[in-house]
Image (spheres, rainbow, N blue to C red):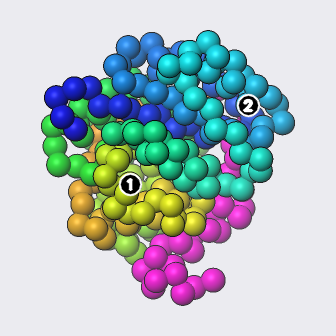
Amino acid sequence: MGESSPKVTVVVPTYNERDNLPKLVGQLTGLGLPGLHVLVVDDNSPDGTGDVADKLATEHPDHIGVLHRTEKDGLGRAYVAGITRALDEGADIVIQMDADLSHPVEAVPRMIDELAASDAAVVLGSRYVAGGSLAGEWGWHRKALSAWANFYVNAILRLHVKDATAGFKAWRAETLRRIDIATIRSNGYAFQVEMNYRTVKQGMRIAEIPIRFEERADGVSKMSLAVQLESALMPWKLLFGRKLG
């Protein structure tokens, strides 16, 4: 990445996040990191999140960009579109981050530092390595489901990653090109798993740093039954060359 500061693009997919988005953007720009850019990918939010994003981009034209999509067809598709734009615009590092304030902004510099100091192809903000934790608001059943999902994925795919479904990640641009991000078709948590699987299959290393995962403060979760079913099937599709389904 050279001696100069890398261009870092934080890709933030949004759908009905008008209250959370300005807070997140304020926290990110408040880090004072040189070369930091935020790309909001809005899926035509009915609550006007896209308009909020445009206003933020007008106020911070050198740091905020907006990609408007006309339909809501899944988190994976939004990320593919945003990451592709980020790479086309010369990003050296691409960060995946939720708009709901569940991912701690203060971990971003640590993730970038880990990429700079190691041979890691991607750094995950992990709930399950030593020092990581979950929101206190999570009930035992939700914690058990999350833990089971990670055990399930690792048992099938042997990723050797503590938090295989994590959505907070810092990628080297060359890693994203090697795993051919544009050809990934899955959504939701399955999208996160497929990206990890492709990284491991390419012989590249995934690093994890501890984070505290917080509960969203405003808005509602977008987790649907279809996303859950896809997440359950995806490890088997990856293992058997996507012949299932």
* Label 2 neighbour load within 10 Å: few <14, some 14-19, many 20+: many
Residue 242 belongs to the span the image colors magenta: yes
In which quadrant of the rendered image does the C terminus lie? bottom right
Secondary structure at badge 2 equals helix
Instruction: Find residue 239 and name its label.
Output: none
Tell me which corner region of the image, top left, top right, bottom left or bottom right, holds residue 36.
top left
Tell me which corner region of the image, top left, top right, bottom left or bottom right, holds residue 112.
top left
In depth, the one of 15 and 83 nearer the eye is 83
Give the percent coordinates (x, y) of residue 115: 24, 40
Q: Residue at x 46, y 59 (%)?
A: 181
Instruction: Find residue 50 and name its label.
Output: 2
Secondary structure at badge 1 equals helix
For badge 2, the amino acid type reads Gly
Q: Residue at x 51, y 61 (%)?
A: 182
Instruction: Find residue 176 and name its label.
Output: 1
For badge 1, the amino acid type reads Leu
Report how far apart the C-alphas of labels 2 and 1 lie in the structure: 26 Å
Residue 109 belongs to the span the image colors magenta: no
Q: Are marks 2 and 1 in contact (CB under 8 Å)?
A: no
Q: Residue at x 52, y 81 (%)?
A: 242
Report the side of 126 relative to 203 (left or right).
right
Q: Which residues are magenta?
A: 217-245
Q: Is residue 150 visible?
A: no
* Label 1 neighbour load within 10 Å: few <14, some 14-19, many 20+: many
Give the percent coordinates (x, y) of residue 185: 57, 66
Q: Is residue 236 above or below residue 96?
A: below
